[in-house]
Image (cartoon, grey):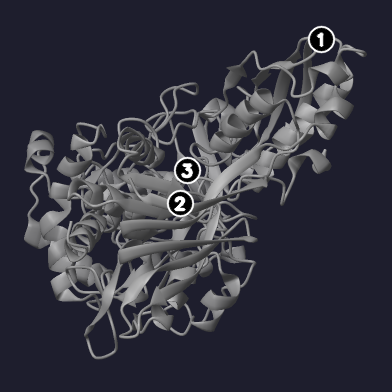
């Protein structure tokens, strides 16, 4: 276990929730005693269950809090629709702490601040109804003990998908590992992804009648990235992606038996988790880490400020700040940077936007799919400061599945088949199976740079059955996020489209699927999932382009060494995941990000462990 050389104890409270007074919701019960029962005995609380309506990050929900005469005994947020592993985790974690410590004086979870504050507001309102608010707000904040210095064979900077893959791989190679994560959540952008992982997989594909080859995967990746990817890195990715699937299965990840097609995947080889979203991967990784806590230590709310180097320039650890104030040092023989991209750093992305989207202002009017605190690009500056070269920074990817106003990928998704893209008038304008950059270029050319994705009962045979992302039509409708029509004419009226143009769009699409016509936009049928869209009910959801992935970053080789401008390795420094450059060219195929994170994450961990002598 990484050694804690010296420790300090401090009281949590840099951003106290008290002053602001699931798995998609959950309910917690407990029997914790009040922290100061002698003070509460004189004025007993009004026992009972009280409710408060709050506005979460994703949607409004109700909080039910049960009180005895002296303690919070249950907090129920089961109506929440906060994101798995992010807002839902914050609600669960903070609710448990509120009951354990009987206080409202808790820090917000970095990366899930809005969810944290909605919980604090709701519990406070319930406490006021029970006559408990004063006691809970005056109760002491919990104390937390951290070390001033940690030592390990490997330090991984970033606890997202790539970072956790690297940490586990290093652990499996015999290394001790410290993972330093700046957010209060684990999983980064992988948590909020759909989880698509591209790999040529004969076992699954042959059962579906899909003919595919690794060389086809390689060619699609190179051509999809406009032949700007490093061929050596791309070959390694496409050759070893299936091994990543099997490695993840060995850790308990269950994939669906059939593969599909992520948006812009240019092939039918996208593996999806059996339970919704990329959070499935993170849960399996966390389970492994908890079972191997003797070799892996997770440190949250830790912002790395510097890579430490010795007199020769070799990296020997990191300096960090816990919650912005408490200095922490991690001494390590190898350091892996896995901090993700910079898509949420508006200033930086505009600065480097000289490539494919130079004609578009990527200011804050363009949203981002990533968790804002996570995708700031600090790892790039850390690596550059240690001598690493940054490449391909102008290669920024937009995704067509953004929610107007936020840029988040929510509600009806663009991934998969059996959906039609139409503009505000109801006319198709693009090949729905095209690369993401081509889709977004076509959207920007439409009135108000927006469009509708239209689906019917083929995609959603039941309004109450969760889709691949855990969402239901029933919930989308109740939140007002989508529009429903029993007929094409009804849908057109609800959305303001021209009914004749919308019907013509559906008819033209169906003719291509039936093999009766060639599509004017180049859409090709033949995917095993393709079905004609003929019966209602029909559903439509408005979408906009959003910043999704940054393909540029730290230059690496196939062993994940961070390289300087001359191509020489920066001693003891490795990198993997979205913080690296050179793999995807100027356009990443849908489903290649998770394949990248897991494939090169495994390599980075194993190489870092070997470098440390593990």
What's the mark number on residue 69?
1
Please name the residue that numbered disc 2 is placed on: 188
Q: CA distance from mark 1 to mark 3?
A: 53 Å
Which of labels 2 and 1 is toward the front?
1
Q: CA distance from mark 3 to mark 2?
A: 30 Å
Where 328 sits versus 533, above or below? below
The front one of 321 and 425 is 321
Where 412 sits versus 439, above or below? above
Please tell me how crowded label 2 is: few (under 14), some (14-19), or many (20+) other residues with Cα within 10 Å. many
First in residue order: circle 3 vs circle 2: 2
Where 522 sits versus 419, above or below? below
Q: Is residue 217 visible?
A: no
The front one of 521 and 582 is 582
What's the mark number on residue 454?
3
Residue 374 pos. (x, y %): 51, 58
Q: Secondary structure at mark 1?
A: loop
- Give me the residue at 24% from left, 48% from top: 171
First in residue order: circle 2 vs circle 1: 1
Which of labels 3 and 2 is toward the front?
2
């Amino acid at each position: 276990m990484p050694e804690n050389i010296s420790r300090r104890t401090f009281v949590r409270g840099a951003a106290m929730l008290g002053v602001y007074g699931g798995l998609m919701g959950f309910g917690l019960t407990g029997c914790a005693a009040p922290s100061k029962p002698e003070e509460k005995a004189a004025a007993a609380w009004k026992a009972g269950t009280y409710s408060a309506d709050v506005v979460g990050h994703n949607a409004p929900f109700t909080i039910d809090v049960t009180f005895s005469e002296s303690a919070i005994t249950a907090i129920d947020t089961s109506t929440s629709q906060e994101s798995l592993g992010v807002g839902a985790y914050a609600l669960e974690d903070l609710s448990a702490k509120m009951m354990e410590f009987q206080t409202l004086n808790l820090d917000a979870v970095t990366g899930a601040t809005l969810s944290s504050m909605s919980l604090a507001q709701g519990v406070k309102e319930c406490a006021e109804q029970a006559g408990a608010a004063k006691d809970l707000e005056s109760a002491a904040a919990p104390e937390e003990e951290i070390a001033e210095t940690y030592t390990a064979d490997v330090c991984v900077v970033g606890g997202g998908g790539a970072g956790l893959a690297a940490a586990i791989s290093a652990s499996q190679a015999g290394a001790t590992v410290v993972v330093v994560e700046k957010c209060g959540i684990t999983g980064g952008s992988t948590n909020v992804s759909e989880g698509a992982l591209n790999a040529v997989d004969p076992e699954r594909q042959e059962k579906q009648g899909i003919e595919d080859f690794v060389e086809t995967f390689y060619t699609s990746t190179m051509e999809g990235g406009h032949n700007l990817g490093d061929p050596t890195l791309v070959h390694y990715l496409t050759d070893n992606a299936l091994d990543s699937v099997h490695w993840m299965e060995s850790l308990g990840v269950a994939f669906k038996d059939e593969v599909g097609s992520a948006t812009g995947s240019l092939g039918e080889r996208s593996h999806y988790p059996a339970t919704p979203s990329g959070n499935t991967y993170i849960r399996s990784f966390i389970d492994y880490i908890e079972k191997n806590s003797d070799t892996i230590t997770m440190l949250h709310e830790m912002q790395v400020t510097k890579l430490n180097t010795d007199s020769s320039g070799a990296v020997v650890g990191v300096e960090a700040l816990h919650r912005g104030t408490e200095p922490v040092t991690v001494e390590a023989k190898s350091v892996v940077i896995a901090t993700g991209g910079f898509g949420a750093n508006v200033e930086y992305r505009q600065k480097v936007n000289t490539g494919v989207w130079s004609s578009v202002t990527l200011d804050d009017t363009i949203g981002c799919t990533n968790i804002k605190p996570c995708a700031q690009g600090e790892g790039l500056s850390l690596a550059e400061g240690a001598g690493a070269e940054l490449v391909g920074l102008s290669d920024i990817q937009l995704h067509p599945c953004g929610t107007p106003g936020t840029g988040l990928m929510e509600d009806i998704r663009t991934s998969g088949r059996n959906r039609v893209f139409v503009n505000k008038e109801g006319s198709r304008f693009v090949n729905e199976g095209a690369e993401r950059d081509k889709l977004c270029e076509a959207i920007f050319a439409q009135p108000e740079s927006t469009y509708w994705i239209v689906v019917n009962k083929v995609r959603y045979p039941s309004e109450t059955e969760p889709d691949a992302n855990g969402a239901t039509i029933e919930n989308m409708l109740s939140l007002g996020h989508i529009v429903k029509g029993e007929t094409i004419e009804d849908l057109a009226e609800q959305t303001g489209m021209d009914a004749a143009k919308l019907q013509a769009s559906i008819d033209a699409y169906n003719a291509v699927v039936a093999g009766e016509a060639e599509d004017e936009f180049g859409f090709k049928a033949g995917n095993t999932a393709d079905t004609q869209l003929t019966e209602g009910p029909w559903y439509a959801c408005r979408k906009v382009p959003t910043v999704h992935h940054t393909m540029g970053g730290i230059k690496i080789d196939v062993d994940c060494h961070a390289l300087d401008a001359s191509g020489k390795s920066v001693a003891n420094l490795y990198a993997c995941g979205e913080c690296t450059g050179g793999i995807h060219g100027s356009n990443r195929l849908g489903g290649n990000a998770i394949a990248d994170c897991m494939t090169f994450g495994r390599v980075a961990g194993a190489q870092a462990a070997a470098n440390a002598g593990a």
